Amino acid sequence: DAGVIQSPRHEVTEMGQEVTLRCKPISGHNSLFWYRQTMMRGLELLIYFNNNVPIDDSGMPEDRFSAKMPNASFSTLKIQPSEPRDSAVYFCASRERLRQGAASTGELFFGEGSRLTVL
Amino acid sequence: GEDVEQSLFLSVREGDSSVINCTYTDSSSTYLYWYKQEPGAGLQLLTYIFSNMDMKQDQRLTVLLNKKDKHLSLRIADTQTGDSAIYFCAESVYNQGGKLIFGQGTELSVKP
């Protein structure tokens, strides 16, 4: 398996523009997470999905941010309009189904990240 | 709410042991993890411990868990320059669908 695939790897845009980040999770994984990493705040959980359904979006900064998972193999994180303070590395991660009592470590597999710079 | 805290920096000499500490708040956590992030890359699982264990050893890595104090530590024996990276502690909140909360990360610098 190729692992979690994110695109673009780097994006530079101007304030006010729409940004769409994409993620393809590992095949067979049923949970998908979006994180944001900055020097100031570390790694913040933005939203996560189980079986394509958003479970907790309390980390989404504001209405300018939205995330979708239309099917098990694709998710997007959209920022509209973008602002300079959105500059960060955005990570997508996926995980197989957690099974109580089974040998499931709950390990998250991360993509390489999308580095966003908003000027 | 859930919170995971770590010190931000640690510097050691090559060959010494490194100890990275972490505290967490959620007592329902079933799994606790250590992830490693190398420059320009995503995080990778280094090791994990079940909440019913006190210690886990894996080659140069030793994880200690004190559930009473909600304290987790990672010891790296014979630290090498290749161990220089950011190390994240994380807890999995099982009663919230396995939501994974990370600490700020500890940047380990290994000097030759």
Image: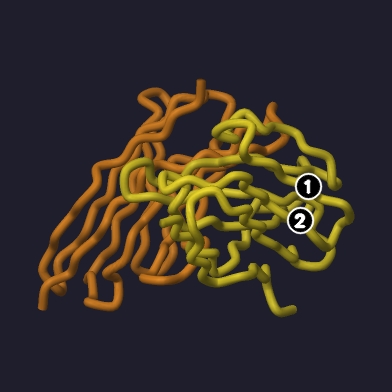
Secondary element at image label 2: strand
Nearer the N terminus, badge 1 or badge 2? 1
The structure residue drawn at horizontal position 23% and vertical position 76%, both measured from the top left corner, is: B80
- Position of B111 with respect to A106 (left or right) is left
Quarter where residue B108 is shown? bottom left
Expressed as whole percent of the image width and height from the top left, the position of residue A27 reads 82, 67
Q: Nearer the viewer, residue A62 or A59?
A: A62
Figure quadrant of residue B36 = bottom left
Q: Residue A103: x and y, percent?
A: 72, 54
Q: Colour of chain A?
A: yellow
Instruction: Tell me which amino acid carries mark 2.
Output: Ser
Residue at position x 10%, y 69% in the image: B13
Count of numbered badges drawn on the protein = 2
Q: What is the spatial separation of the Cα atoms under label 1 and label 2, in whole angstroms?
A: 6 Å
Given contact means CB atoms under 8 Å apart, are the residues at marks 1 and 2 in contact?
A: yes
- Which amino acid type corresponds to the residue marked 1 in the rendered image? Lys
Note the chain letter of the orange one. B
| Viewer-closest of A119 and B48 | A119
Which residue in the structure is indicated by mark 1?
A68
Residue at 58 percent of width and 31 percent of height: A62
SS state under label 1: strand
Is B87 on the left or on the right of A23, as rendered?
A: left
- Residue A25 lies, in percent from the top left, at 74, 63
Res. A59 in view: yes
The residue pinned by badge 2 equals A75
In this rendering, position of residue A47 left or right of residue B61: right
Q: Which mark is residue A31?
A: none
**Marked residue chain, label 2:** A
